[in-house]
């Protein structure tokens, strides 16, 4: 019965959460595949398509946290969850679809002789669903080529 807990938990979720989980489960491998086939510029341009006009509640922080939590739930169980860039782009796309402005940040850090990259989403200037100190561990890139980076998970 232990293996049924995730299914029971999913069935108990509100319909809006189930719908978001479905969208994320579809988008994660599409974004990851798109990044591998077409690159960041093309995928970002596609995901930037006009967002819906949605009337937001006064405080959208709980919605950001909800979407990040559900994406995290999916990525831990999804066989094709991808790396941090595809997860960040997927969360950013989901937030845009609900009218919430956020930004994808790309950062690099030196790890021995390697240059490591990481991507995350920021909402109101703060990282979403990231361990503390991510902004201090990575130097944020601005308009730099992304070839040659090894993306951490």
Image: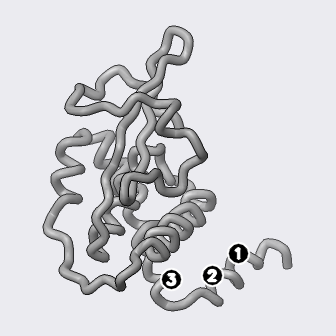
Front-lying residue, 112 or 141: 141
* Residue most extreme to the top: 113
State how far apart marks 1 and 3 are (Cα). Answer: 13 Å
Q: Earlier in the sequence, mark 1 or mark 3?
A: 1
Choose between 121 and 116: the one closer to the eye.
Answer: 121
Q: Mark 3 and 2 residues: CB-CB less than 8 Å, in contact?
A: yes
Callout 2 touching callout 1 (CB < 8 Å): yes
Which element is circle 2 on? helix
Please say whether residue 21 is visible from this viewpoint: no
In the picture of the structure, the residue carrying the numbered disc 3 is: 18
Which dot marks residue 150?
none
Q: Position of residue 48 (x, y in %)?
A: 19, 59
Task: Write down the quadrant of residue 102 in the picture.
Answer: bottom left
**Residue at the spot of label 2:** 10
Query: Circle 1 is placed at which residue position?
Result: 6
In the rendered image, which quarter contains the C terminus?
top right
């Amino acid at each position: 019965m232990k293996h049924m807990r995730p299914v029971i938990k999913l069935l108990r979720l509100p319909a809006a959460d189930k719908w978001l989980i479905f969208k994320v489960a579809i988008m994660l491998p599409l974004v990851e595949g798109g990044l591998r086939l077409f690159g960041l510029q093309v995928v970002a341009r596609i995901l930037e398509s006009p967002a819906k006009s949605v009337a937001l509640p006064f405080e959208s922080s709980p919605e950001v946290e909800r979407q990040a939590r559900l994406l995290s739930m999916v990525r831990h169980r999804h066989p094709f969850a991808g790396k941090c860039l595809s997860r960040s782009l997927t969360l950013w796309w989901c937030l845009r679809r609900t009218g919430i402005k956020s930004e994808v940040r790309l950062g690099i850090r030196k790890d021995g002789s390697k240059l490591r990259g990481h991507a995350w989403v920021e909402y109101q200037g703060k990282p979403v669903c990231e361990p503390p100190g991510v902004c201090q561990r990575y130097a944020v890139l601005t308009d730099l080529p992304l070839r040659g980076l090894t993306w951490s998970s």
